[in-house]
């Protein structure tokens, strides 16, 4: 089932929805982890997201995944949801929300390399230069965090999460034309919730000791960054292609810095801001001079 490519303004709107919802997750995760551990938080968050997904699939009477697509759904949920959130939450124990978003912004470079190597997508020389400049900014940020870039530090865990995000962005692209953005996201979230299920009892045991604001924070994390954010981003990737859509993720750090200040009054350090300037310079180069012509992927019809 295919439709014509969507209007660019509609693509921009849904990209903004994804970025704004994801940006809010960085500070809220740090706050909620005062009451609950990193992995139990991931389990509780995606158990709720999985319940929402099941409800939506039943309401829409969405078709079940075909047998040949099940391994790809399992990989998307296991890598892009479960492993990503375990690494990300654990890394954010020691890394600030703003710095975490800048580290995650290395994901577009990783996704672009994967897309070029495996899927035949192309970036121009300016695209690669912009990506490398942005990655240099990420390294600047990482060097100022506890443990630096040493193995097992918070920064390396966040970079591992960035790699998971890049792999997820690439893997889920082929599912969109068949199932649509929402159904693809719903099945991926269900897989992610099931993989994290062993930690759910620990999370439920923590609930009575959690404050009401932090309980509401978990609900917000399940509904907006998880369900809505992933669905919006999946749709955008289906319209733009992996390499071009991944470049938009460079906009996530400034969005996160603003939301972190607004929500938890987190003020970034000078080194973080310097790294952010370098990242945004790379964004400008990649987005204005770095786009190679690519064929659009047909939307699956939502």
Image (cartoon, rainbow, N blue to C red):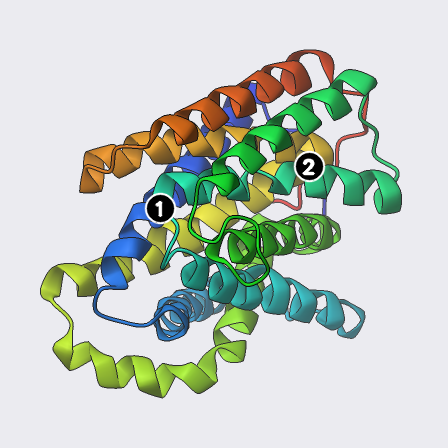
User: Left of 224 or right of it: where is 65?
Assistant: right
User: Left of 211 or right of it: where is 55?
Assistant: right
In the structure shown, which secondary structural element does the residue marked by tag 2 occupy?
Answer: helix
Q: Which tag, 2 or 1, sits closer to the chain's start? A: 1
Compute the Cα span from label 2 to label 1. Answer: 22 Å
- Determine which residue is flagged by label 2: 109
Q: Residue at x 68, y 36 (%)?
A: 109
Q: Residue at x 14, y 77 (%)?
A: 209
> Is residue 61 visible to the viewer in this orientation of the structure?
no
- Determine which residue is flagged by label 1: 96
Dividing the picture into quadrants, the one containing residue 237 is: top right
**C-beta proximity under 8 Å, tags 2 and 1:** no
Dividing the picture into quadrants, the one containing residue 67 is: bottom right
Q: Residue furthest top?
A: 289
Q: Residue at x 82, y 19 (%)?
A: 125
Residue 154 locus on image (x, y percent): 47, 56
- Does 1 sit above or below residue 135? below
Residue 226 locus on image (x, y percent): 43, 55
Crowding around mark 2 (Cα neighbors within 10 Å: few <14, some 14 to 19, many 20+) is: many
- Return the residue nearer the eye: 258 or 136: 136
In the structure shown, which secondary structural element does the residue marked by tag 1 occupy?
Answer: loop
Residue 264 locus on image (x, y percent): 20, 42
């Amino acid at each position: 089932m295919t439709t014509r490519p969507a209007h660019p303004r509609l693509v921009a709107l849904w990209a903004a929805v994804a970025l704004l919802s994801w940006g809010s997750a960085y500070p809220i995760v740090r706050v909620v982890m005062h009451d609950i551990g990193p992995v139990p938080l991931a389990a509780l968050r995606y158990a709720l997201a999985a319940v929402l997904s099941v409800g939506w699939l039943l309401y829409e009477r969405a078709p079940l995944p075909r047998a040949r697509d099940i391994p790809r759904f399992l990989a998307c949920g296991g890598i892009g949801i479960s492993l990503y959130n375990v690494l990300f939450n654990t890394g954010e124990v020691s890394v600030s929300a703003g710095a975490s978003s800048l580290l995650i912004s290395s994901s577009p470079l990783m996704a672009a390399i994967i897309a070029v190597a495996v899927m035949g997508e192309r970036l121009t020389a300016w695209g690669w230069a912009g990506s490398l400049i942005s990655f240099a900014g990420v390294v600047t940020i990482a060097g100022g965090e506890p443990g630096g870039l040493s193995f097992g530090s918070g920064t390396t865990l966040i970079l591992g999460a960035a790699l998971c995000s890049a792999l997820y962005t690439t893997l889920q692209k082929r599912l969109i034309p068949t199932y649509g953005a929402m159904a693809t996201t719903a099945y991926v979230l269900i897989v992610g919730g099931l993989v994290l299920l062993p930690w759910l009892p620990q999370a439920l045991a923590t609930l009575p000791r959690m404050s009401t604001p932090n309980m509401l924070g978990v609900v917000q994390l399940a509904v907006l960054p998880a369900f809505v954010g992933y669905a919006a981003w999946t749709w955008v990737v289906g319209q733009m292609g992996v390499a071009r859509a991944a470049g938009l993720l460079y906009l996530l750090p400034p969005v996160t810095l603003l939301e972190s200040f607004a929500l938890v009054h987190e003020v970034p350090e000078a080194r973080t801001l310097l790294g952010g300037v370098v990242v945004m310079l790379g964004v400008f180069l990649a987005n204005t001079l770095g786009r190679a012509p690519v064929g659009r992927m047909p939307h699956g019809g939502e």
